[in-house]
Amino acid sequence: MATDAMTALQTFLTTSIDEALKKRAASDIETHVLELFQTVASEVPAYCSFLSEQGIQAGEIVSLKHFQSLPLTTKFNYLQRYSLADVCRQGQLESCDMIAVSSGSTGEPTFWLRSIADEYEVATRFEQVFRDSFAADQHRTLAVVCFALGTWVGGMYTANCCRHLALKGYPVTVVTPGNNKTEILRVVQKLSPLFEQTVLLGYPPFLKDVVDSGIAQDVPWPRYGVKLVMAGEVISEEWRSLVGQRLGSTHPCYDSASLYGTADAGVLGNETPLSICIRRWLAAHPDVARELFGESRLPTLVQYDPLSRFFEVQDGTLLFTGNNGIPLIRYHIADTGGLLGYEELLSFLEARGFNPIMALGSSLGVHPLPFVYVFGRSQFVVSYFGANLYPENISVGLEQAPIYGWVTGKFVMAVEYDSAQNSSLNIAVELAPGVESSAERQQAIAESIRHHLCRLNSEFVNYVPEQYQTPQVSLFQTGHPEYFPVGVKHRYTRSSAVKSQ
């Protein structure tokens, strides 16, 4: 363990991000994946048993085609069937030095082991964002960790990776108020004036709440050069523009970045200035986005390192293989999405009249890495007249002027049936602190949601009869215990009907 950690640390500290990504682009991905598989098959007791039960001899897996015929691993058929020790190398818990706990959003919480060597691998993703997007190698940077601290993976992992950047020589200083909004605003106002820029790292709805609460308290966000690092939810480009405007952002492709992260394996990919530039153009061209992604909603679009996390797609959902404290082979994460090659995506866009590198105005930090797009879990969708409606479609309607000044951005959507089994789309919306409900605001919100559903979702406009297209909107005060309880992970859909207030 100590040897592995020292090797990983030395590699991380002595290899520039450009050099690391250049080497990886030239590497033989097939050889790397097969070597990782053979190592896991011989060193991890649970995976040895898993293959044996399937009648698979590891020595017969000698090509990528063979590898892609291996059975998928999941939480249920692999992680929950074997002891925690047996899913580690050599069956030794002590091969790892830290345990994190998943959120439990898909059932019982799961324990995830990792070693510090794993963190150096993931810290490279943070380095991409801090260097290529924020130029944090040149500016004194305060990193404010706004993810929850404790056993959950986000806060501790993020704080550690930011400290690894400081160890590498980046002028980055970390403070960890966690998801305590009062403490975040206190440390920002005290410490941000001492730095050239401030990076807030957290979940998008929470960061927006922090920003809005700061504005209400006269926090001078534009003075602090604030950047955002986000994870956990798909945001719209309207959201990015809105929050960026409130922070004084002038370069949306360089002032924020989302991470595609999971408790299972840390960070799998990250937004880059290139991927954001592409996504913003696609947001303005929904017909092209539908052609590319096959859906009316806009997914998170990130670039990834195939030697760090090897992705596959099966039946519209993502699989990945990666080396972690618990090594995972062809792990089915249950996220819907897909893959796009670097040249494949740029050629697609060029054929439709868009050159993102030219639009960025610089090739600095542009790496020829493949793209993965992620819609998220399929359960966050409601069916209305046969049209699939996604939270991403609704969010855009709430992010228009003047509506964004009335609401927090949180909502709950459901389909309700009356006694005659006529259906209606009901949406509960959380009002911003101090904002009162009114019939005029309800109507304006309903019309905005309907307009943008028709613009973005071709199923909605074609399947739903016009008289049923305007949703029934209910407005609730901040922190309503039934729809917007404080301190728990928000869900945008529910099976029961939304009640009017």
Image (cartoon, rainbow, N blue to C red):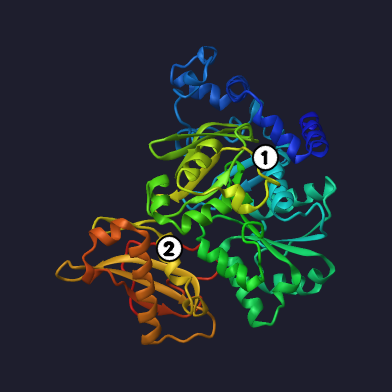
What residue is disc 2 on?
Answer: 492
Q: Toward which corner of the image does residue 247 lie, by quadrant?
A: bottom right
When the figure is inspected, residue 76 is found, relative to residue 414, above or below; the finding is above
> Looking at the image, which residue sits at the far top?
60
Residue 333 appears in view: no
Residue 394 appears in view: yes
The image position of residue 340, as x and y in percent, is 50, 38
* Residue at 71 percent of width and 78 percent of height: 219
Amino acid type for the residue under numbered disc 1: Arg
121 displayed left or right of 67:
right
Q: Secondary structure at mark 2?
A: loop
> Looking at the image, which residue sits at the far left?
420
352 displayed left or right of 111:
left
The image position of residue 274, as x and y in percent, is 60, 49
The image position of residue 464, as x and y in percent, is 24, 62
**Circle 1/circle 2 CB separation < 8 Å:** no
Crowd rating for badge 1 (residues with CA inside 10 Å; few <14, some 14–19, many 20+): many
Front tag of 1 and 2: 2
373 displayed left or right of 290:
right
63 displayed left or right of 428:
right
When the figure is inspected, residue 313 is found, relative to residue 377, above or below; the finding is above
When the figure is inspected, residue 383 is found, relative to residue 117, above or below; the finding is below
* Residue at 14 percent of width and 69 percent of height: 420
The image position of residue 408, as x and y in percent, is 51, 73
When the figure is inspected, residue 3 is found, relative to residue 282, above or below; the finding is above
What residue is disc 1 on?
Answer: 114
Q: Where is the N terminus found, in terms of image quarters? A: top right
Q: Secondary structure at mark 1?
A: strand
Decide which of tag 1 and tag 2 comes sooner along the chain.
1
Q: Could you tell me how far apart the alpha carbons at marks 1 and 2 are, in whole angstroms?
A: 31 Å
